[in-house]
Amino acid sequence: MEYKTLFTTFAMIFLAELGDKTQLATLAFAAESKSKVAVFLGSASALLLTSLLAVAFGSVLSRLMPEAYIKTGAGALFVMLGLWMILLPGGK
């Protein structure tokens, strides 16, 4: 196992997830739920599944196109989603 990759990935994802909407949603669910264990298991399972899908799709994409294109595409998608959320808020 590549421990440097493991620890780098952990640190970057941990920092990126602090205070994001997923964590805030989990906080809200925990505040209103009597079963904190169920909230934790549901949240952890969802994050595990989304990470599994990201690794699987990333592995497939890396065979089809250069890494630089994947990084550029991911960055562009991130910016587009951010602009979409700013310019077209879904509230009433």
Image (cartoon, rainbow, N blue to C red):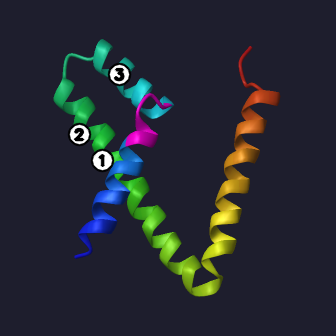
* Residue at x 20% of width, y 24% of height: 36
Count residues near mark 2 (Cα–Cα under 10 Å), then give few for <14, some for 14-19, many for 20+: few
The reply to whether residue 32 is in sight is yes
Magenta span of residues: 15-20
Residue 23, percent across and down?
Answer: 40, 30
Q: Determine if the magenta segment contains residue 19.
A: yes
For the residues labelled 1 and 2, say whether their Cβ atoms are less than 8 Å apart. yes
Q: Amino acid at mark 3?
A: Leu
Query: Which residue is found at the position 77% from the left and 37% from the top?
Result: 84
The location of residue 40, given as percent across then percent down, is: 24, 34
Between marks 3 and 1, how big is the CA–CA gap?
A: 15 Å
Find numbered disc 3 in the image and state the secondary structure of the residue it sits on.
helix
Q: Which label is found at residue 45?
A: 1
Q: Tell me the quadrant of the picture where the C terminus can be found.
A: top right
Structural distance between the alpha carbons of marks 1 and 2: 6 Å
Which residue in the structure is indicated by mark 2?
A: 41
The residue at the point 45 percent across, 63 percent down is 53
Residue sticking out furthest to the front: 4
Front position among marks 3 and 2: 3
The residue that mark 3 highlights is 27
Image x and y of residue 22, in percent: 45, 33
Per the image, label 2 sits on a secondary structure element best described as helix
Residue found at the far bottom of this picture: 63
Relative depth, front residue between 49 and 76: 76
Separation of marks 3 and 2 at Cα, in angstroms: 13 Å
Q: Residues within 10 Å of mark 3 (few under 14, many from 20)?
A: some
